[in-house]
Image: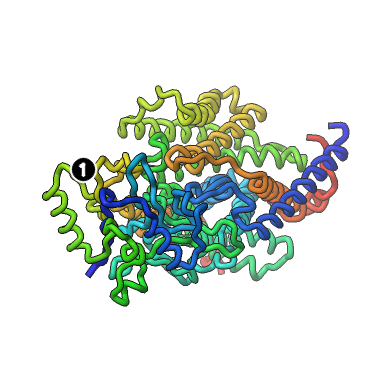
Amino acid sequence: MAKAILFDSTKCIGCRQCEAACAEHWGLPYDDTVAQQERISERKLTTIVTRGERFSRRLCMHCADPTCVSVCPVAALRKTELGPVTYDEGRCIGCRYCMLACPFQVPAYEWSKRLPRVKKCDMCYERQTAGLPTACAEACPTGATLSGERDELIAEARRRLAESPGEYYPHIYGLEEVGGTSVLMLSAVPFEQLGLRADLLREPLPRLTWRALSLVPDVVVVGTVLLGGIWWITHRREEVAAAEARAAKEKQS
Amino acid sequence: MRSRLARLTFWQWVFLAVMLGGLYAAYVRVLGGLGGATHLSDAFPWGLWIGFDVLCGVGLAAGGFTLAAIVHIFNIERYKPILRPAILTAFLGYLLVILALLFDLGRPYRIWHPLVMWNPHSVMFEVAWCVMLYTAVLALEFAPVVCERLGWRLALGWLRVVAIPLVIAGVILSTLHQSSLGSLYLIVPHKLYPLWYSPFLPVFFFLSAIFVGFAMTIFESWHSSRAFGKQLELPLLASMGRVLAVLLAFYLVLRFLDLGRRGVLRLLLEPRTETYLFLLETALLAVPMLLLFRLRVRSQPGGLYLCAVLVIFGFVAHRLNVSVTGMEAGSGTSYVPKWTEVMVTLAIIALGFAVFRFAAKHLPLFAEEPPAARTALPAPAVGD
Ligand code: SF4
């Protein structure tokens, strides 16, 4: 039932219809200056990145085990069963740990606002619950962006790689990166050449911190016993002396 | 020495200027938001306020739990005279860290959210709870000083009953907190430069907190003795200096073993900013370590003080390298703090110094002194 997006950069013509549709969906002003900024920000939650003749998209990758969800102290970010990673602005305290931690540098902040929020793509969560495709996929004139079930889209990507191996670099970006993402990408060239990070770990990043965090109960238990024990030993002599004094006193009375 | 009063007024003047600057910076922060008051960006969301005010602030407060453990748990009574100032420093340090957090959080009025909105998988959640609980513990650990001053015998009795459980809780919370500040960076293996990224970050943050706790105690005792005309507890501090040297050696050996195990020692041959910063950080710790192993340096107040200052700088260099300079290349940007960020930081430091001075004058911080000596304290102290 998990939703996903398949982006095939070989089909993308850089028309930026996805950007415009996304801006409209979020009620963000969109004009040429915004279009020219090829960087995710509070002004645009998805962007086309141009590298020579090739175009690729940037948007929240909606990881299977999202780093941002694991790091948010107040659980403002959530991985929904449907697939999208959503943000609850009512909980957010603005620590920006999600921004620091995201391996794709996706969450953006409303830096100039006095009551700022994090901004990120939510894979059109509301539209998807109503059974609609994402706004960007709907707007895409060439079918470079497809919205659908993750399993089906993976199958589709594999078919394309198998059918025309000459046209594609043989890798589905997002299948395994940081444990897998809900946005999958295909490219004719190695993904670094599109400006994407190809050196990401295959393991979900939350595991890196969980290894340390899961030791907390042990530290508490062992620490208490250890410190209590040391205290007991180092103060025993005093206690013994005090007890003897008390005993002596009782004998006297 | 001659014009002690003139010197005081100079520092008071500096203090005033810094506080006014800080207030203005706070005004800019409130009005202009984080964008107007900082050079932070989407690619570089944490800067000086987190890197210095929070990470270093918490570390520099570590003297509190180390000394509390030494005196109360290990029952090494002779360190008792310097325990109270250390607890006060820790308590003030934590309050100032919370103040800095209020500047840095996008929505500071929601700072209490982690109390009711939980995510145990988040290191930040652990950090938030440690800050809250340990600040409360420190308040209670410091409360006897205030109660003594006010003559509240009943409260004192109760505080004595819970003293040991409090100390144990404080040591454990500090262990968790200091190490969790390192764990925060476990999640950025792709961003943090390999000379600093290590699965042992929490261990290094914990160990460095302990050694800087010793350095801070020496630093403070030296300043208190000058400011309040007290005798320096030299034999005591010299023995701390020796422990400090051993701790530094242990830390540095572990650090290099880790670099070797991860196979990144060869990075030291690369002519990059990170290499130089790493060497600087290491030198700032290795030099005082070598010096402190010599009895001649340890038994001189000046030598001890110098070493303590070097260690504090080395500690700050490490935490800033992890949080700021080591993150720049991996984030694909550079970051230089804006004047407002620097001003707020300076004002927070100045506030810390001022409150400490005030408390030292009016509270029985340096215990075991006859009350007469205490009441005489507010007058300008004579000679060093
Ligand atoms: S900035 Fe908000 S959403 Fe991001 S980690 Fe912090 S509290 Fe969570």
Question: Residue under circle 1?
Answer: A169
Locate the C terminus of chain B and report the quarter of the image it occupies.
top right
The residue under the point 36% across, 56% down is A67
- Coloration of the structure image: rainbow
**Would you say the beta carbon of the disc 1 residue lies within 8 angstroms of ligand 1?**
no
Left or right position of B193 against B375 = left
Instruction: Name the amino acid type tagged 1.
Output: Tyr
Q: Is residue A83 above or below residue B214?
A: below
Residue A245 visible, this angle: no
Residue A150 visible, this angle: yes
Left or right position of B305 against A73 = right
Question: Where does residue B364 sit, x and y in percent of width and height?
Answer: 72, 54
The residue under the point 28% across, 56% down is A144
Q: Residues within 10 Å of mark 1 (few under 14, many from 20)?
A: some
Q: Is residue B30 above or below residue A105?
A: below
Question: Where does residue A207 sit, x and y in percent of width and height?
Answer: 30, 53
> Regarding mark 1 in the picture, which secondary structure is present there?
loop
Chain of the residue under the numbered disc 1 shown in the image: A
Which residue occupies the extreme left position in the image?
Answer: A163
Q: Nearer the viewer, residue A218 or B59?
A: B59
Question: Where does residue A172 sit, x and y in percent of width and height?
Answer: 22, 50
Q: Which quadrant would residue B215 be assigned to in this image?
A: top right
Question: Where does residue A60 sit, x and y in percent of width and height?
Answer: 37, 57
Which residue occupies the extreme bottom position in the image?
Answer: A130
The residue under the point 33% across, 56% down is A61
